[in-house]
Image (tube, grey):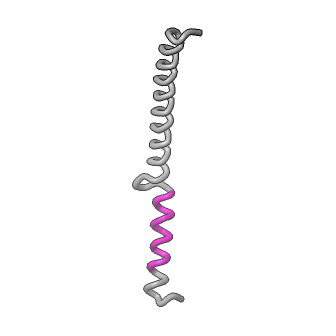
Amino acid sequence: MSTRTLAPRLRRQRGVTAIEYAILAAALAATLFAVAGDEGPLRNAIDSAFERVETTIAEGGE
């Protein structure tokens, strides 16, 4: 395979790879938003943990 026929093929491959990475990034962002959004389970767990720490400190560490 010559350099002339290989170069366009490599450019197309890079374009496809970039699109694949963009799709993966979008899927990851959607998943993170679903888990850690305003009312997601992760957000609720973190809020609950902070409330327990706050209550423990307010009660004097008991």
How many numbered circles are shown? 0
Indicate whether residue 46 is drawn in magenta.
yes
Q: Which residues are magenta?
A: 42-54
> 56 or 29, which is in the foreground?
29
Q: Residue at x 47, y 90 (%)?
A: 60
Q: Residue at x 44, y 79 (%)?
A: 54
Residue 47, quarter of picture:
bottom left
Q: Quadrant where the N terminus lies?
A: top right
> 23 or 54, which is in the foreground?
23
Indicate whether residue 60 is drawn in magenta.
no
Q: At which x and y percent is residue 21?
A: 49, 33
Q: Residue at x 46, y 27 (%)?
A: 19
Q: At which x and y percent is residue 22?
A: 45, 33
Q: At which x and y percent is residue 59?
A: 46, 88
Q: Residue furthest left?
A: 38
Seen in the picture, residue 42 relative to 31 is either above or below; the reply is below
Q: Quadrant where the C terminus lies?
A: bottom right
Q: Residue at x 46, y 84 (%)?
A: 57
